[in-house]
Structures are given as structure tokens and as C-alpha cells.
Image: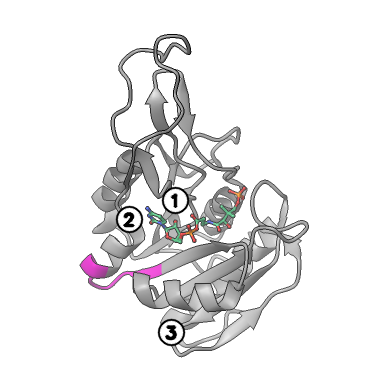
Amino acid sequence: HPRRDWTGRRLLISAGPTQEAIDPVRFISNRSSGKMGYALAEAAQARGAEVVLVSGPTALTPPAGVEFCPVTTAEEMRKAVTGRFSWSDTVIMAAAVADFRPTQPAAQKLKKRQHPVTSLGLSPTEDILKELGERRTTQVLVGFAAETEDLLAHAREKLQAKGVDLLVANDVTAAGSGFGSDTNRVFILYRDGSAEELPLLPKRDVAHLILDRILTLQTGRRSP
Ligand code: PMT
């Protein structure tokens, strides 16, 4: 890559969905493909960063040169991310972490005759990003917000609640945007209340622009 402007930086990225077991064969999850997080990992590696990619289950191949840490559940993702936190100088949480998990996953496959499941007891998972926001020392923290309505209002609330420096908001119901697509249309929100709207772009290009903005935030300089 012509720009090696992430050389010497240690970037921790989460990507993909998590899966929360109902029984040994069933789970609760979401529509994240991992494409946005993997695009960030690949772009940062190409620009010289040391990258650790913590990923839930996806169909993607981890980018070459990136340290890959596969996980399944929100709790496994929490352990992997918090375990790497002190190593990192920047964290980007692009993963779609499950907010709830079945409280008592069944040890055996639930049989529809003996145990017809008509409702599930759920418990909240830990909010990983919020925990990082409380624990951070010098790290730059970047979150995402996946919204289906009132994108900017909800994203501004998350920016405050999670204590991040920069928040990437996407409307996951917009055409060509959000889960699964190769493109995304995002707003980048800052702590001073400002927001930048980016056009619909390939996730690769969105990734490079997010990396540009993080550098600008840290150095006060625009990257070329
Ligand atoms: O993977 P793709 O198919 O490419 O789709 C990309 C994407 C839509 C998944 C991605 O662009 C995106 O928006 N990721 C965040 C999805 C999400 O879970 O958003 P949220 O608004 O629910 O969460 C807000 C932030 O808190 C996120 O940074 C999330 O990683 C983090 N979080 C959420 C819950 C939780 N228990 N722990 C967390 O750390």
C-alpha cells in the first residue's frame, strides 16, 4: 500500500456476529457477515499497523498478516477483546455483539415433543465497548452503531453512553448499507457533536476513510 501511515500502531478490531446457544444445535445470532470489520483489518494491515482481529463466526477468510482470534459467544468476545486491550493503542468494535443470550442453554437438543419451546428466558450480555470506555487509559476507542430509525439521535446517545472518541453510524435498513452488503453508507460522529456524512461506498473505502479520521483525531493532521 502506498500509505504506510499506520506503521507502529497496534489495532484491535472486532468483527462479525456472536452466537448464543439455545441448545447444542440452535443459537441466537444476527445478520453480520463480518465484511466491515475484515475490511478495516485488511486496510490497517496494508497501511502498516499490527492488527489483531477478534471475529465471531463468518464465511470470510482472515486477511493475511493479521493475527486472527476466532470466538463464538459474546462472553468469549469480551474475554478476547479485554485480554488484548492493554496491548492495543486503538480499538474498533465493528462486531454485532448479541445483547441477550439464553439464560439456561439446554445440555441436550430440545425435542419438540418433550420440550416444545414457546418462549426463551434471556439474560443481558456484558457491553464490551462500555467496559472498555470505563477501563481505558490511552487507547483511542471507536464504536459502531447499527440503527433502523432515528440514526443520528440514537448514534449520539451511544457515543456518550459508551465513552468512545468516534462513532460510525449506519442505517442497517438502507439499501446497499449495513449487514451483509459489500457497500456501506455511514456517518462519522465525534465527541464535539460534529458529524460527517459519507456517500455510499465499498466497505474497503469506508474502512480507509475511518482509518484516516482516527489518525486525524490522534495527530490533529489530515493524512495525505
Ligand atoms: O458485518 P457486516 O455484514 O459487514 O455488517 C456491518 C455492521 C452493520 C455489523 C457494522 O457496520 C456495525 O454497525 N457494527 C455494530 C453492530 C452493533 O451491534 O451495533 P450496536 O448499535 O448494537 O452496538 C453499538 C456498539 O457497541 C458497537 O460498536 C458494538 O460492537 C458494541 N457492543 C454492543 C453490544 C455489546 N454487548 N457489546 C458491545 O461492545
Q: Is residue 212 magenta?
A: no
Q: Residues within 10 Å of mark 1 (few under 14, many from 20)?
A: many
- The answer to whether 135 is drawn above or below residue 112 in the figure is below
- The quarter holding residue 143 reads bottom left
Q: Nearer the viewer, residue 7 or 105?
A: 105
User: Mark 2 or mark 1, which has the lower sequence index?
Assistant: 1
User: Mark 2 or mark 3, which has the lower sequence index?
Assistant: 2
What's the residue at 62%, 65% (across, down)? 170
Whether label 3 touches label 1, CB < 8 Å: no
Q: Nearer the viewer, residue 171 or 204?
A: 171
Q: Residues within 10 Å of mark 2 (few under 14, many from 20)?
A: some
Label 1 lies in ligand 1 vicinity (Cβ under 8 Å): yes
The numbered dot on residue 213 is none
Q: Horizontally, is 185 left or right of 155 in the view?
A: right
Question: What is the magenta range?
Answer: 134-141
The percent coordinates of residue 35 (x first, y second) are: 62, 47
Q: CA gap, disc 2 to disc 1? A: 10 Å
User: Amino acid type of disc 1?
Assistant: Ser
- The quarter holding residue 164 reads bottom left
User: Mark 3 or mark 1, which has the lower sequence index?
Assistant: 1
- The quarter holding residue 119 reads top left
The numbered dot on residue 191 is 3
What's the residue at 54%, 38% (across, down)? 62
Residue wearing tag 1: 14
The percent coordinates of residue 205 (x first, y second) are: 69, 63
Whether label 2 touches label 1, CB < 8 Å: yes
Q: CA gap, disc 2 to disc 3? A: 19 Å
Residue wearing tag 2: 128
The percent coordinates of residue 97 (x first, y second) are: 43, 49
